[in-house]
Image (cartoon, helix red, strand yellow):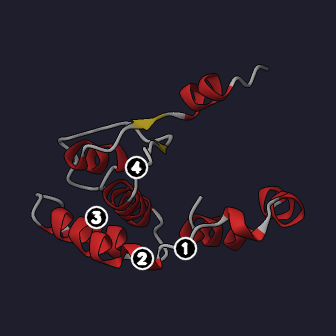
Amino acid sequence: MIDKVKREIYYQEDNLTAWCKENVKKQFWKSTSDALAEYAEVQNWAQDKNYNERALLQFADVKNADPFLVAFALNTIRNSDKKMTIVTLEVSNLDSKKIVKLPDVCIDFEIPYINNNEFFRRIGVQF
């Protein structure tokens, strides 16, 4: 989990925030500071697509964790032997012009992604 997702979670100040504060250790949150070159690469990728101006501004907002997730994954894959998979509720829409969908970024950067249900299956959670 990256620092930018932590910021999104803590901003909400809800039950998830409280749970994280009580149960998640500080070292769980990984810094994205080493992935700034990849972040620029991801932003440049978006600029080269046919997204509208609002979508690009939203994607470039530093409060948006999505491009940082991709950048962190790229940096990790390129600089270690670790594999990365991004978990998202979003569904790919390669024709979208109004929003940059995280799966679409993953597809172009060849980063595997799964939805929450698949994630829970893989880690063996049963309800």
Label 4, residues with CA under 10 Å away: few <14, some 14-19, many ≥20: few
Proximity of marks 4 and 1: CB atoms separated by less than 8 Å: no
Proximity of marks 1 and 2: CB atoms separated by less than 8 Å: yes
Q: Earlier in the sequence, mark 4 or mark 1?
A: 1
Q: Residue at x 70, y 23 (%)?
A: 124
- Return the residue found at the far right: 22
Residue 98 pos. (x, y %):
26, 56
Q: In front: 11, or 87?
A: 87
Determine the CA span between mark 4 and mark 1.
18 Å
Residue denoted by label 4: 81
Disc 3 marks a residue whose amino acid type is Ala
Residue 29 pos. (x, y %):
65, 66
Determine the CA span between mark 2 and mark 3.
25 Å
Q: Secondary structure at mark 1?
A: loop
Disc 1 marks a residue whose amino acid type is Ser
- Compared with residue 3, is residue 23 higher up or lower down, i.e. above or below? above
